[in-house]
Image (cartoon, coloured by chain):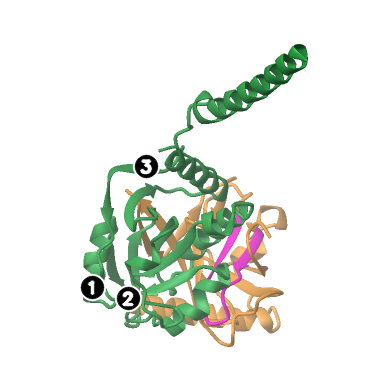
Chain colours: A green, B orange
Amino acid sequence: MQKTTFIVIAVVLAVAAAISGAWFAARLGAPPAPPEHARLLSTPRPVPAVPALDHRGADFGRADYEGRWTIVFFGFTHCPDICPTTLNVLAGARRLLDDLPEAARPAVTMISVDPGRDTPERLAEYVPFFHPEFRGVHVPAQHLPELARSFGAAYAYAPLEDENYTVDHTASVFLVDPEARVAGVFPTPHTAEGIATDMRRIMDLENRR
Amino acid sequence: MKLTCLFRAGLLALLLCAGHGAQAETTQAEAKASDAESPAVTDAWVRRVPPAARMTAGYLRIHNPGPEPVAIIGAGSPFFGSVEMHGTITVDGMSRMREHERLEVPAGETLSFEPGGLHLMLMQAREAIPASGEIPFTLLLEDGRSIDFSASVGQPGS
């Protein structure tokens, strides 16, 4: 009788030790890998509250960033090369993260640096083409400088022929944390694999805090 | 600048017409150059864009097997009202796109038009930009020759 009790206790202890060992190994054993491409800010900056509309015409504000990570790209629809290239890369990165629970998959947003031509309707015809969950954001021209500045993004209008124009713009991709703060930058060049791997690492680091 | 553009556009229109008609106006350069030494275009594709897009970009490789450099001074397509050669340069994370009026392909070398770099900027689509199929193009060279090729509409990596 005594012997059986002893064995039961021993087995329970062994199992408990194994589980806690595995837990500690998972939590502390492997040092968290830092992101390879992204530069994380030591002091994240809150995204300012400026009026904006998403491509469906709904208000888009700080609350839309809260609760999940958001990848932000500053672009415009009359951009034949770098914007579709970047949006394709981001769509690839998002697809690589499809195994994550829905709430953990990062949102992707293109903020237009060309509010004069990029109405919400036009953004609706363009942005979701790359991925059905991507959101286009229209910020009125008078508020765009404040928003861009908070990200550290720049843009400038450059004339083309026939009164046409193009927009020089920051090609880096930004990261907004679930508390609606600008938390990091992916400098160029971008690859889907690089961004997806870094997103996993960044979310992993955050979960260990 | 404006005049040069008009001139180039005119020349290109002429070439496009000539190309589709009888090959009556064979230039001396064309007569001299053997096929083996003629620059050739490969891997040409046009980025598939949302139906609403007014413009897109074309990419290609052009190889110059000849002993002399060749220069591209224009491009055209019956599908687009305007085709320009543009280059995207990204400096300190800032992307700028500028027109190139002339691009040289050194002897024996290949010039690549690829995403994030050189591209044919395709503007003023005559009808909706097709989502698949082939789009015909002509490159105009400084020596009077031209290169006809077609580019398939698609998406990289798909």
Query: Range of the magenta residues?
Result: B42-62
Dot 1 and dot 2 residues touching (CB under 8 Å): yes
Task: Tell which subunit mark 2 falls on.
Answer: A
Q: Residue at horizontal 32%, vertical 76%? A: A52
Question: Do tags 1 and 3 sit on the same chain?
Answer: yes
Magenta stretch contains residue B44: yes
Mark 1 Cα within 10 Å, few/some/many (few <14, many 20+)?
Answer: some
Q: Is residue B120 left or right of residue A14?
A: left
> Which callout, 3 or 2, points at the residue further toward the start of the chain?
3
Nearer the observer, disc 1 or disc 2? 2
Q: Secondary structure at mark 1?
A: loop
Q: Position of residue B123 (x, y in %)?
A: 49, 78
Mark 3 Cα within 10 Å, few/some/many (few <14, many 20+)?
Answer: some
What's the residue type where badge 2 is placed? Ala
Quick check: A152 above or below A115? above
Quadrant the N terminus of chain B occupies: bottom left
Name the residue beneath numbered marker 3: A39
Name the residue beneath numbered marker 1: A143
Quick check: B107 above or below B86? above
Name the residue beneath numbered marker 2: A52
What's the residue type where badge 1 is placed? His
Quick check: B112 above or below A57? above
Q: What mark, if any, has residue A186 been given in the picture?
A: none
Closer-to-camera residue (A132/A43): A43
Q: Position of residue A77 (x, y in %)?
A: 44, 74
